[in-house]
Image (tube, helix red, strand yellow):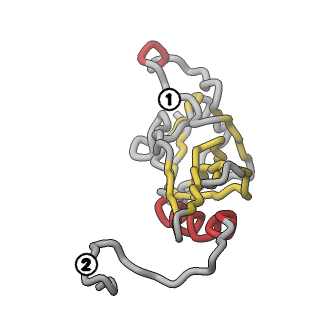
Amino acid sequence: ECPTGSSTDDPFYWAPAAIDPVDLVPDALDRVSSQLAAPTPAINPDAAAGGIVNLGMWLAVDDPGTTTARAALAGVWAQVTANVSSIEFDLGNGDTIECDGLGTPIPDWALEAPEQGPCGYTYRQSSPDDQPYQLAITTVYDINWTTSNGTSGSLADIRRTVTVDYDVDEI
């Protein structure tokens, strides 16, 4: 309750007279980091079907969209934004692929084609019997920040990874 007898629904807090909004960036970063999801694979052939030796794969992930979080105190704020910049695939056989953006989902016209996509891979050897390859898919998020006083910058990338079994057979 205010000394004049009026009240407010806004919370009160003690704060230094001058807060640099850049000091709020770590809190905003923690908030955005906690919201970043692991990638959702959009590969073809998908993991449930498995792959075939010498049949090209199309590699992509679903778009998680932009993730934004803001920290505010005493009328100033810092905002952190995360966007997928690239994806990385560890194919489980020692090979790796990195693609810009979200990769390339397979278009309908290519469903019957044996060639790999522009973000793709072709296994040349089957996975060991009863031991599918461990396909690790990583989304790399670009992290940028801005503040209420107009300053901005970039922070270190954040990575999220999911691993799926990927059985590759020879026909």
Q: Nearer the viewer, residue 161 or 170?
A: 161
One can see residue 90 in this view: no
Q: Secondary structure at mark 2?
A: loop
- Expressed as whole percent of the image width and height from the top left, the position of residue 50 reads 47, 43
- Expressed as whole percent of the image width and height from the top left, the position of residue 140 reads 64, 50
Look at the picture and state if 97 lies above or below 9. Answer: above
Under mark 2, the amino acid is Ser
Write down the residue under mark 1: 105
One can see residue 82 in this view: yes
Q: Residue at x 51, y 60 (%)?
A: 70
- Quadrant location of the N terminus? bottom left
Look at the picture and state if 53 lies above or below 10. Answer: above
Under mark 1, the amino acid is Pro
Badge 1 local density, few (<14 within 10 Å), some, or many (20+)? Answer: many
- Expressed as whole percent of the image width and height from the top left, the position of residue 40 reads 45, 48
Q: Secondary structure at mark 1?
A: loop
Q: Nearer the viewer, residue 47 or 69?
A: 69
Q: Residue at x 71, y 41 (%)?
A: 98
Asked whether disc 1 touches disc 2, contact meaning CB atoms under 8 Å apart, the reply is no
Q: Residue at x 64, y 24 (%)?
A: 118
Write down the residue under mark 2: 6
Quadrant position of residue 119: top right
Q: Nearer the viewer, residue 11 or 122?
A: 11
Q: Residue at x 47, y 57 (%)?
A: 37
Q: Nearer the viewer, residue 35 or 73?
A: 73
Quadrant position of residue 157: bottom right
| Left or right placement of residue 163 versus residue 144 in this view | left
